[in-house]
Image (cartoon, helix red, strand yellow):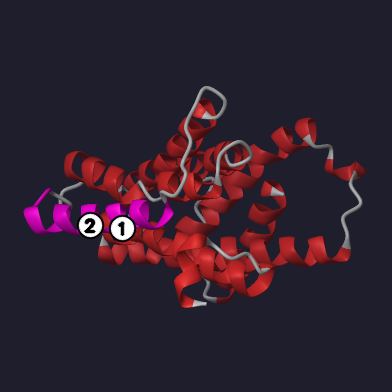
Amino acid sequence: MQFSRVLLGSIPVLLLCYYKKIKIEAFSKDWPWFASIGFINLVVPFFLIAYGVKSVQSNLAAILMSTTPLSSTILGHFYTKNEKFNLIKTIGVLIGFFGIVYLFSDNIVINENNFISALLILFGSTCYVIGGVLTLKISKKRNENVTGSILIWATIILLPIVSFLEQPWNLSPRLDSTISVIYLGIVSTGVAWLLRFRILKQNGLIFQSQVAYLIPIFGVILSYIFLKEVKKLLLPYL
């Protein structure tokens, strides 16, 4: 599914570049930047997080994936010019993180059976921050060019991996699964990464990473609406 998401996500971005006559620099002299960001931002996290969540509780996964503002605060301080520590920024990040811990810490279990999986999710989430730091190094380039070039390289990297591991030509997906993948590719990958890089360039690494605080909350709300899953933290309001 990762390959399909990235491939489908690249289509609207490349069409937008063609419409706006923006040159794609995926194979220019800066290709190592695009290949590195594509690998770190789109290949590694997809595999690590997808594998890790199979063995950990959903609330633990939510907490682990909400550590990105913490890692972005640390990495941003050392590897960017305008993202230095200050008291207000640090307090804000910590309040957000401990709010997620408070909401999702019910019956969390970390043991020898899921410790490695938890580390994989944590590392996968941190990869988004590392990719953000690298993206800031080429922030003078057009957003559409950066997004399109990164998606191209992620597609190239994923193609042999998926061919070896999944052999997609043997799959016969259902119609609803196909529609879901198309949505995830076009909207949740193509459009979302355009917006992600735009926010990253305009508002900074820490601001952009704080979307991690919203994902668990909307996950709970949408799982209740569409999947009828009732989390314990919602019971007082139902």
The answer to whether residue 64 is seen in the rendering is yes
At label 1, the amino acid type is Gly
Residue drawn at (63%, 64%), measured in percent from left and top?
229
* Residue 178 image point, x, y percent: 81, 62
What segment is highlighted magenta in the picture?
Answer: 85-104
The circle drawn on residue 99 is 1
Disc 2 target residue: 95
Q: Is residue 153 magenta?
A: no
As shown in the figure, which amino acid type bears the numbered disc 2?
Answer: Ile
Which residue is most to the left? 87
Give the structural element (helix, strand or loop) at label 2: helix
128 sits left or right of 8 in the view:
left
Residue drawn at x 73%, y 60% is 181
**Measured from the top left, where is residue 170 in percent x and y?**
92, 42
Q: Are marks 2 and 1 in contact (CB under 8 Å)?
A: yes
Residue 47 sits in quarter: top right
- For the stretch drawn in magenta, the main secondary structure is helix
- 209 or 216, nearer to the observer: 216
Task: Decide: few, some or many residues near mark 1? Use Cα within 10 Å; few <14, some 14-19, many ≥20.
Answer: some
